Amino acid sequence: MNERDTRNLLSELAASLFVRGFSVGSAGNISVRLPDGYLMTPTNSSLGRLDPDRLSKLDADFRHVGGDKPSKEVFMHRAFYQARSDAGAVVHLHSTQATAVACLPEVDHTNPIPPLTPYFVMRVGRRMPIIPYYRPGDPAMEPAINAAARDARAVLLANHGPVVSGKTLTDAVYAAEELEEAAKLFLMLRGQSPRLLSTEQVDDLLATFG
Ligand code: 13P
C-alpha cells in the first residue's frame, strides 16, 4: 500500500472507531510503520475528524519531519515498534471497558483477561499485562512498555487505557476492538465462573491463526 492509501485508511479506521464510541473527544492515537518512517495522529486531534494530509510524519528515528505536531504518546508507540519487529501499527484508546479493567487493583496484573473467546486469543494473544500508571505523555513509560511488549502484542496502562499492536493497521484496529469486547465480557462475567478456553484450545488457535 502506498503512503497516500495508508493515510486514507488510517483516517477512515480512526473515524470508524470514533463513531462507534471506542474513542471520545481527542482521546487516543494511532501510528503505522512506513518504509521510510511512521505516520502518527497529531496531538489533540479527534480520531473522528483526521485530515489525511495533516497526519504527522516521523522518520525512522521517530523525529518529526512533516505534518502537524505528533501525539504526545510517541514514546508509547516507539516502545512497541522497538520491542516487536512484527509491529506494523499501534493503536492507543481510552475505550471504556478495557480502561475499567485497567482501574481494578485486585485483578492479575500479569494477565487480567482470561481466554474467554477465540477472537480475543487470535487478535490479542495469550498474554496482556497491566503496566503501572504513568502521566499521559510521560517518556518514563517507554522502558516499562518496551519490556512488556517483548512478550505481548497489547498492554493495558493502569487507569489510562489499552495499547495494541498489529502486523498491519487493520490488524491493530481489529485487535483493539476485540480487546474492548473481551474486557466487556470479563466485566459482565465477574463473580461468575465462566468456562474458559483450555490451554490446548489456546495453543490450537495460535498455531492455526498466529
Ligand atoms: P494526544 O492527543 O497527544 O495523542 O494524546 C491523547 C491521548 O490519548 C493521551 O493518552
Image (cartoon, rainbow, N blue to C red):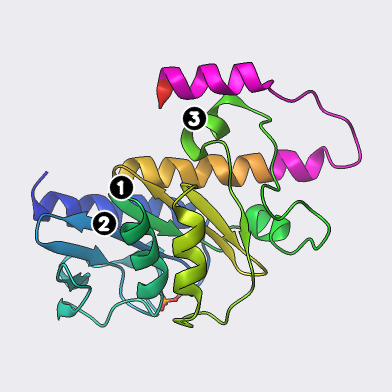
Of residues 22 and 154, the one nearer the viewer is 154
Decide whether residue 206 is among the magenta residues. yes
Q: CA distance from mark 1 to mark 2?
A: 6 Å
Circle 2 residue:
32
Circle 1 residue:
169
Question: Looking at the image, is mark 3 or mark 1 earlier in the sequence?
Answer: 3
Residue flagged by tag 2: what amino acid is it? Val
Query: Which SS class for mark 3?
Result: helix
Q: Is residue 74 visible?
A: yes
Q: Position of residue 190 (x, y in %)?
A: 85, 42
Is residue 155 placed above or below 60 in the rendered structure? Answer: above
Q: Residue at x 58, y 48 (%)?
A: 128
Q: Residue at x 30, y 66 (%)?
A: 50
Q: Residue at x 68, y 22 (%)?
A: 197
The quadrant holding residue 52 is bottom left
Report the span colored magenta: 184-208
**Residue 18 disc label:** none
Magenta residues, dominant SS class: helix
Q: Determine contact: label 1, label 2, CB under 8 Å.
A: yes
- For this view, does 176 lie left or right of residue 160? left
Of residues 188 and 138, the one nearer the viewer is 138
Is residue 210 placed above or below 56 in the rendered structure? Answer: above
Residue flagged by tag 1: what amino acid is it? Leu
